[in-house]
Amino acid sequence: MKTFFRLTENAVASLAEKFGTPLLVLSVEQIRQNYTFLLEHLPGVKIYYAVKANPDENIIKTLHSMGSCFDVASDGEMQALTSLGIETDSMVYANPVKTPAGLRVARELGVHKFTFDSESEVYKMAQAVPGGSVLLRVRVDNPQALVDLNKKFGAHPEDALPLLRLAREQGLQVAGLCFHVGSQSISAKAYLDALKLCRQIFDAAAAEGFDLRILDIGGGFPIPAIHENTDIVAMLDSIAAGLSQWFPATEIWAEPGRFICGTAVNLITRVIGIQQRNNQQWYFLDDGVYGTFSGVIFDHWDFELETFKSGMLIPATFAGPSCDSLDIIFKDKMTVPLELNDVILVPNCGAYTSASATVFNGFAKTPVVVWEEIQFQTVEMELATAG
Ligand SMILES: *Cc1c(COP(=O)(O)O)cnc(C)c1O
């Protein structure tokens, strides 16, 4: 099984001392490994990293240097990437409902690949980005995903052909189809079902003279989570087999978000308050649901807390530092008893965490340091001392 970036107890202690807490530690090496791993197991697939999962510029630059493309969803993401020197050719504006500002910025910058799932979007694109290259997003149902995106997006398969026709009539370049099986999808089945469905639509479209060249299989690839650890190799291998069976000659794109960044970040947080209320043990941490733990709310994620302590487990409530009653991270979370100032490591903290964090109540966003850079600094410091 793959191993992932996980700070040791010593590293956690010295980083907490040197930088303070809360602190996010990003391993760009893990980003590289995740990207390479996906390419190895989905050979020939063009990767468009879904920027919304974590827009940290160290991640973007690392992926860019490896040849990755990017899935963007807003004017802000297109502008941020452009300012980092990313070519618009390697972006797909993959939000099926684009804002006027998003379309204007796409046109100004020259982003020319889009996804859509409705008639009204065809007219919007035909007017704002005439001749744009478009992928139709089809709806695929997958109740097994942690976050089901298909309640919000995706054209019903029966509407696919009429939408493709309309896009062609409106002068858009009809390039292919896309789907998203939902985030943290734990089996290959949803992808394989989607591939079969898309094959039918490709064939029906070909009969009407469409030359669909691209299939975008979206994101959703899982990372290890508390109650599950999917056999990712078997999963990707069976998706790859499905692709070569049904789409041997088609250009395939994928839009992984979580898989690329989720395992590359560790949070170091600290116990800043302890309370007993109604026989329940409460621990207050210096990061909360308005911050890095926003994934508890927006991403339905259950985070692992590594305390580096041993002892009898007790159920406890973990709360964040803000004064809001919503700022409760976990209830009845089993933990060893903790003390004030204890540091806690939260691994696999890179996806849908800092990206959706706020500065509510005046708490700044948790700073990010790059593990490989600070390791180097530490070595330099040691050399300087030795010299
Ligand atoms: C969020 C999103 C992704 C990334 O999904 P993950 O589950 O993080 O891989 C990819 N494509 C689109 C269109 C998305 O909205």
Image (cartoon, rainbow, N blue to C red):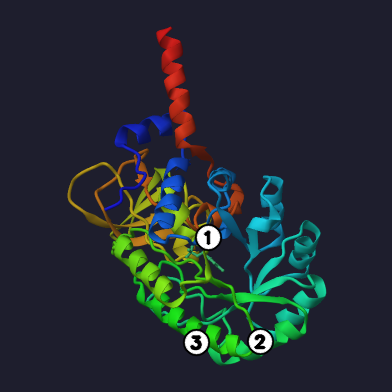
Q: Residue at x 43, y 14 (%)?
A: 383
Q: Position of residue 28 (x, y in %)?
A: 47, 42
The CA span between labels 2 and 3 is 15 Å
Kind of residue at disc 1: Lys
Q: Position of residue 249 (x, y in %)?
A: 50, 71
* Res. 131 image quadrant: bottom right
Residue 163's tag is 2
Q: Position of residue 47 (x, y in %)?
A: 52, 59
Determine crowd level at label 1: few under 14, some 14-19, many 20+ residues with C-alpha closer than 10 A.
Answer: some
Residue 200's tag is 3
The CA span between labels 3 and 1 is 22 Å
Q: Toward the viewer: 286 or 110?
A: 110
Tag 3's secondary structure?
Answer: helix
318 versus 5 height, above or below:
below
Nearer to us: label 2 or label 1: 1
Tag 2's secondary structure?
Answer: helix
The residue that disc 1 covers is 46
381 versus 44 height, above or below:
above
109 versus 213 height, above or below:
above
User: Disc 2 vs disc 3: Cβ atoms closer than 8 Å?
Assistant: no
